[in-house]
Image: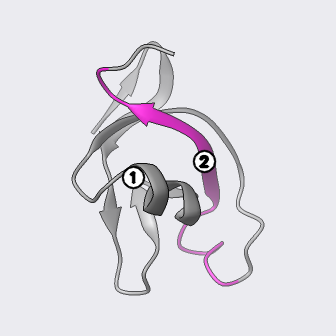
Amino acid sequence: MSKDKKGVYSGLIEKDENGNYFCGQYLLDYQRVEKDFKIGDKITIKSVIDNPSDKSVEQYPQKSRDFFLFNLKK
């Protein structure tokens, strides 16, 4: 959706045909989304790392574990 002054990126959580959670071009940590979020939540990604997974690195070169709901300040 957009770049945000307080984070790397803001947008909606989506799930692809392979079961990966993502927001824009960024892969999201699966366990964190399952525990604390749902599809359609608007989040802000605070930081990203290179995706360490061989299975999804071509589709999502970067991954985030550091994200929060859009309206919350952290």
Residue at position x 51%, y 37% from top?
67
* Residue 71 in the image, given as x and y percentages of width and height: 29, 21
* Residue 6 in the image, given as x and y percentages of width and height: 48, 14
Above or below, 25 against 69 in this view is: below
Q: The residue under label 2 is which amino acid type?
A: Ser
Quarter of the view holding residue 5: top left
**Regarding mark 1 in the picture, which secondary structure is present there?**
strand
Label 2 and label 1: CA atoms lie apart by 9 Å
Residue at position x 39%, y 52% from top?
23
Quarter of the view holding residue 16: bottom left
- Give the left or right position of residue 61, taking residue 43 as reference: right
Q: The residue under label 1 is which amino acid type?
A: Cys
**Regarding mark 2 in the picture, which secondary structure is present there?**
strand
Quarter of the view holding residue 22: bottom left
Tell me the tag on residue 64. Answer: 2
* Residue 10 in the image, given as x and y percentages of width and height: 36, 34
Above or below, 40 against 15 in this view is: above
Task: Work out whether mark 2 precedes mark 1 in sequence or the reverse, and give the earlier one.
Answer: 1
Q: Quadrant of the N terminus?
A: top left
Residue at position x 51%, y 16% from top?
74
Near-viewer residue (67 or 54): 67
Magenta stretch in the rendered image: 55-71
Residue at position x 37%, y 51% from top?
37
72 inside magenta stretch: no
Crowd band around label 2 with a 10 angstrom C-alpha radius: few (<14), some (14–19), many (20+): many
The residue carrying mark 1 is 23
63 inside magenta stretch: yes
- Give the left or right position of residue 34, taking residue 50 as reference: left
Crowd band around label 1 with a 10 angstrom C-alpha radius: few (<14), some (14–19), many (20+): many
Q: Are marks 2 and 1 in contact (CB under 8 Å)?
A: yes
